[in-house]
Amino acid sequence: MNVKIEKLIKQFAKLPRVGNRAATRIALGLLQDKNGRIQMLADALTDAANSIHPCSCCGVLTDMDLCEYCSDITRKNGQLCIVRDLSDVLVLEKSGVFHGRYHVLGGNLSGVSGVTPNDLNLDNIKSRIDNENIKEIIFALPNTVEGKTTQQYIISIIGDKDVVFSELASGVPLGGDLDYIDDGTLTLAFGGRKKL
Amino acid sequence: MNVKIEKLIKQFAKLPRVGNRAATRIALGLLQDKNGRIQMLADALTDAANSIHPCSCCGVLTDMDLCEYCSDITRKNGQLCIVRDLSDVLVLEKSGVFHGRYHVLGGNLSGVSGVTPNDLNLDNIKSRIDNENIKEIIFALPNTVEGKTTQQYIISIIGDKDVVFSELASGVPLGGDLDYIDDGTLTLAFGGRKKL
């Protein structure tokens, strides 16, 4: 196969959950497209690579200095939701359940993956609490050992501030059949049972 | 969500078999990648868009004037395999079953999709037969009404040349369970049964 086409296929095959077969199909589809989509995609990528960077305050990706959430004064409601990455912000925004400000860590502490506190976006977390008059910090981190470790670490470094900490509830998902739920979730759901 | 990120996601979502969810995952993965993969992909795309074009002889995509198959003198063995598009060439090359030259049509005649003989790469098919001393034309077109119509059309325009025409055999695929095979294939396999 032509070297340049092969190079393009290899770049596509590195994308998350795109295998060799799909990468070939995508590359050939673009190369044979008559509407110039290949140049449009290249331009959108170059434009994004040059202009998109983390918000200087919260870490959400943006092309401005402050992202759309940090620059929206109506979202300054005293609540700060700490998430792992941008996709979590998008999920929460889509649900419409949260109307405060975000703080994106860019990862979770992990011995296995070698993620240390220095790798997380935490430099300005204490100044944000003061500047934005934060009253409640909501942890929306993954319900895993890494997520819980990260949560404990963050509480330990900002524990002297006058804020309420909360985390998302654990339990049986909506529509969840008990047959298909793992023991860990069941134990959490049982321990956190609500009186009726 | 940021407009530029949204634009990038939309470009990815237009790729074959990439839905909105996968497009979002791909775009965010690239934007958060620390090894500069986003610029590498943009460069590979721009490079391909500027240099890749159909081979002036057979229509295979290449960055040279003649593709690797047309410039390979050992492949001038008198056989010409007519295929619909480049992905068919790749499948045949991978199987190692064919060692002659290719001719890529760029589509099949289709009333529904409005593909006419003028849309197919057929201008030089007669001169190729003379210049490359072609003795056999092998049709490796899709086993569909469109494929067979295209095959008949091509035979009709080069019928006066001294060449043998052949097409790939129809039948039960290797490992194919009769339970799962459609009636059309079964009828073809039955009609084309071989004496043992």
Image (spheres, coloured by chain):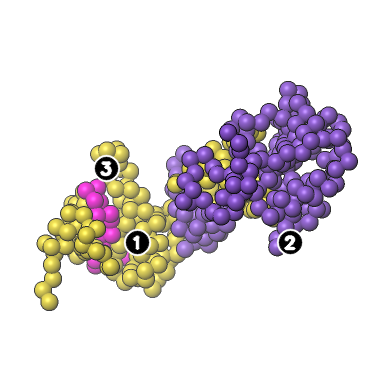
Chain colours: A purple, B yellow
Image x and y of residue A119, in percent: 78, 53
Q: Who's the residue at 86% across and 35% down the image?
A: A162
Residue type marked 3 = Ser
**Amino acid found under the numbered disc labelled 1:** Tyr
Q: Quadrant of the N terminus of chain B?
A: top right
**The quarter of the displayed image where residue A93 is located:** top right
Whether label 3 touches label 1, CB < 8 Å: no
Q: Which of marks 1 and 3 precedes in the sequence? A: 1
Label 2 environment density (alpha carbons within 10 Å; few <14, some 14–19, many ≥20): few
Label 2, on which residue?
A111
Query: Residue at the location (24% across, 47% down)?
Result: B146
Q: Is residue B189 left or right of residue B85?
A: left
Q: Alpha carbon of mark 2 to alpha carbon of mark 1: how far? A: 54 Å
Image quarter in which the C terminus of chain B is found: bottom left
Disc 1: host chain: B
Is disc 3 in the same subunit as disc 1? yes
Would you say residue B141 sits in the magenta stretch?
yes
Secondary structure state at the residue bearing disc 3: loop
Q: Residue furthest front?
A: A195
Label 3 belongs to which residue?
A: B110
> Disc 2 sits on a residue from what chain?
A
Magenta span of residues: B132-147
How many numbered discs sit on the rendered protein? 3
Can marks 2 and 3 be said to lie on one chain? no
Q: What's the residue at 83%, 48% (across, down)?
A: A156
On the image, the x and y values in percent for residue A58 come to 76, 38
* Nearer-the-camera pick, B53 or A176: A176
Residue behind mark 1: B102
The amino acid type of the residue labelled 2 equals Gly
